[in-house]
Image: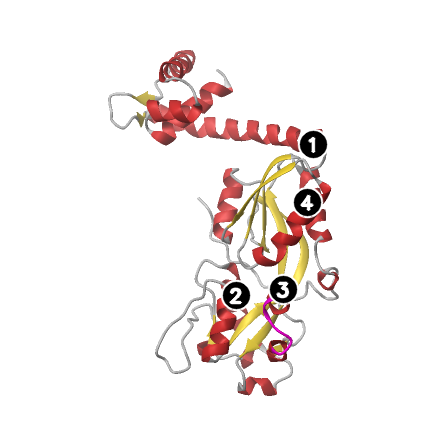
Amino acid sequence: MTLTQLEYIVAVAETRSFFRAAERCHVTQPTLSQQIKKFEDVLGVVVFDRSRKPVDLTPAGETLIAQARRILDEANQMRRFVDQNAISALSGDVRLAIIPTLAPFLLPRLVRSLQENYPDLKLHIEELQTETIADRLLKGDLDFGIMATPLGESRLDERPVFYEPIYLYFSPHHTIADKKIIRAGDLNRNEVYLLADGHCFRDQALELCRDRRARRESTNGHFDFAGGSLQTLKEMVDAVGGYTLLPWFACHEYLSSRDRDRIRPFYPPAPVREVSVVSRAHELNTKSMAAMVAALRESLPKELIDAPNSKQNVLPIHLRRQS
């Protein structure tokens, strides 16, 4: 039994075709078929029901494929460990994902830092929502995620890097401008613009508003709105009225000096979101994890590093359990 044979049977299981599996593995179909037959002969089981179109797994095959995936995943972890530690803490191919409400602000800084410190590193970066990043980390499809935490998932290793304050941003001449500091109870849920479902920052905003059933409704009741970006929320507040919640980076990147007169902090302990580098727990890449954390920390503005009382009111993430 070899890792190559395991790769072949997994490819057939995923494509349901010997021909497509051979293409994916860059071998001829006879070669792939012969290796799979050897695998079946060694174990004395039939993995695939070849009489069916598309090819289907036998009951024994279902069990073997699940085990094969685990073995291949462990082997890939060892390869990545060797690749990333042979020359430096971060080298070779590294697969990274980041949530959309952090990507515009952190990615340019982080990539610049990584390029300067790890010139041999080849980054594969995706912008994904929290649920997708967590799922792909657990499956081994990603090495690191940069996301809001805590996720409450024991199979993931979270390394907090900074705590980002959250502010209220309101429309011009809104009556809430009379308040210099905001309490959660001051917010009218029907005036709060929120991101669409699936964004973890939406969940955190609802947690702050203390009403997880909240929907965005305009003050005149004529439409519902769920935004796709923090910038869109800001523009809707400017044009239509009401208010929204913005994290520190968005306030500094999206708002002009005049717009910043329309942000208010919350009463202490002020709400913050915890931002972490996340990987799958019990990985071998502890050295590269430490390097990624250091690179992100190095790229941050000084205001966000070691802010006093930063951990007191971390808004939680309600992560659905992955199957």
- Sequence order check: which comes first, mark 1 or mark 2? 1
Q: Can you identify the residue that label 2 sits on?
A: 230
Residue at left offset 36%, top offset 80% = 221
Q: Position of residue 193 (x, y in %)?
A: 47, 72
Question: Mark 2: which secondary structure?
Answer: helix
Residues marked 4 and 1 touching at CB (< 8 Å): no
Q: For this view, does 180 lie left or right of residue 61?
A: right
Viewer-nearest of discs 1 and 2: 2
Which residues make up the magenta segment?
A: 253-258
Residue at left offset 38%, top offset 31% = 14
Q: Residues within 10 Å of mark 3 (few under 14, many from 20)?
A: some
> From mark 1 to mark 2, how far is it between C-alphas?
38 Å
Q: Is residue 39 magenta?
A: no
Amino acid type of the residue that numbered disc 4 sits on in the rendered structure: Leu
User: Splitting the image into 4 quarters, where does residue 260 fall?
Assistant: bottom right
* Residue 64 shows up from this direction: no
Amino acid type of the residue that numbered disc 2 sits on in the rendered structure: Leu
Q: Can you identify the residue that label 4 sits on?
A: 114
Q: Examine the residues drawn in magenta and state their main secondary structure.
A: loop
